[in-house]
Image (spheres, grey):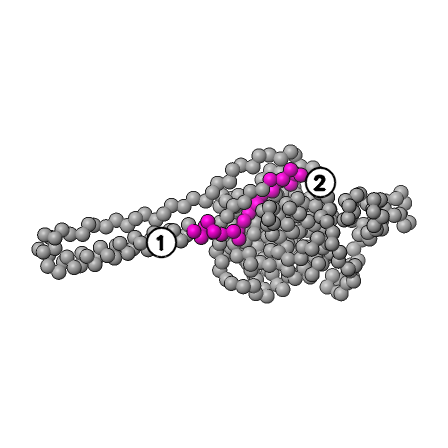
Amino acid sequence: MKQCPACNRTYTDDELLFCLEDGAQLQSMGFGTSGGGDAPTTIDANYDPNKTLAFNPPRDTSPPPTNVYTPTPPPPVSRPPVQQQQWSPSPTPSYSPMPSAQTARKGGKGWIIAVIAGVVVVGLIVVVLLMVIGKDNSNSNNSNANRTVVNKNSNLSNTNANTTNRNTSVGTSNSLKDDFSTQNWPTGDAAYGSFYEDGEYHMKGKPNLYVYMFPYNSANYLSKDADVKVTARSVDGKSPNYGYGLIIHGKNNANRKLDGYGFLIYTDSAPKYEIVRFDDGTPTEIVKWNDATMLRTGTTPNQIEVRAQGSQLSFYINGQFVKSITDTSNITDGYVGLYTSETNEVAFDDMEITR
């Protein structure tokens, strides 16, 4: 049990560090622990997150103050300019000029054939130009594939880049499987070099920056009341320092910054997991890095899973339950996204979303 020294509110979650009301650092109330420290937290092996649980009634709260990541990253570096996607219109088809009146008279019916051929060529030119203009308008109007790179330090910067919306289906079904054989996620320079290879989606971050991606047809990747699974691995066997994993209930707010939750894993020696809430792009640790012996290290893939039910989020690694939290910020819907940090390449595969 912890208590806020400012407002005297009490909290039963020993992993909270700061008061959700005024941001003051919480103090342990003792209750039998020596030295005034928090009682160690254990996870009941028989705990079933899908059982009906009783929660305190929801109440309006203000976002808590920003918690600084540990270890603190180096000072932010200037972000390189984003290279905009380039396109060139299709070349104009070459064609011969229409015959002169004298040639037409000499050729008899030949001039009729020449006129028809000229009309066909002109029609082809018009069709090509309309296709190019339509493609350009599609690129300029799309906003579903926004990608933002945000500094993990407290001085955050944001960059948005639009790419073509490739909606392949309409509406939201009760299940979705994405084996990354179809390019539904941003790639190329505008996506910081993300690419598809061997049926996987590869991402990299930037020094002291994290990167998150939403799919093109994000309406099919809603996370409200959904069970979301994805397989993730380190390509070279070295984990990004600040982890990689899933974004749940994610969205770009009015400031074009990230709101939502992140379920992140670290797969070097002494593997760990972390749960983060993003508020206007600023990450706040809800569950700090915890040991996760069920995580596989090196280049071996791991399946990470989040089950969302109302305000409750339950987290699993390789089929084993690790933690359950209750949302206090009214973030209960949004989209599924992918996250990584630093420059170590990671690959994602076999995403499943069921409702």
Q: Is residue 230 magenta?
A: no
Instruction: Looking at the picture, tell me which residue is in the foreground, 343 or 278.
Output: 278
Can residue 41 be seen here? The reply is: no
Q: Which quadrant of the view contains residue 35?
A: top right
Q: Secondary structure at mark 1?
A: helix
* Residue indicated by mark 1: 130
Earlier-in-chain disc, 1 versus 2? 2
- Seen at 58% across and 40% down, the residue is 206
Point out the image quarter for the C terminus: bottom right
Measure how far apart labels 1 and 2 are at the Cα level: 52 Å
Q: What residue span does the magenta drawing correspond to? A: 137-157
Amino acid type, residue under disc 2 in the picture: Val
Q: Horizontally, is 152 left or right of 162 in the view?
A: right
- Seen at 16% across and 59% down, the residue is 112
> Relative to 219, is 283 above or below?
above
- Seen at 70% across and 41% down, the residue is 69
- Seen at 42% across and 50% down, the residue is 136
**For residue 16, which numbered disc appears in the image?**
none
**Location of residue 81 in the rendering, given as x and y in whole percent from the top left corner:** 51, 37
Mark 1 or 2, closer to the camera:
1
* Residue indicated by mark 2: 68
Amino acid type, residue under disc 1 in the picture: Leu
Total labels: the figure holds 2
Q: Secondary structure at mark 2?
A: loop
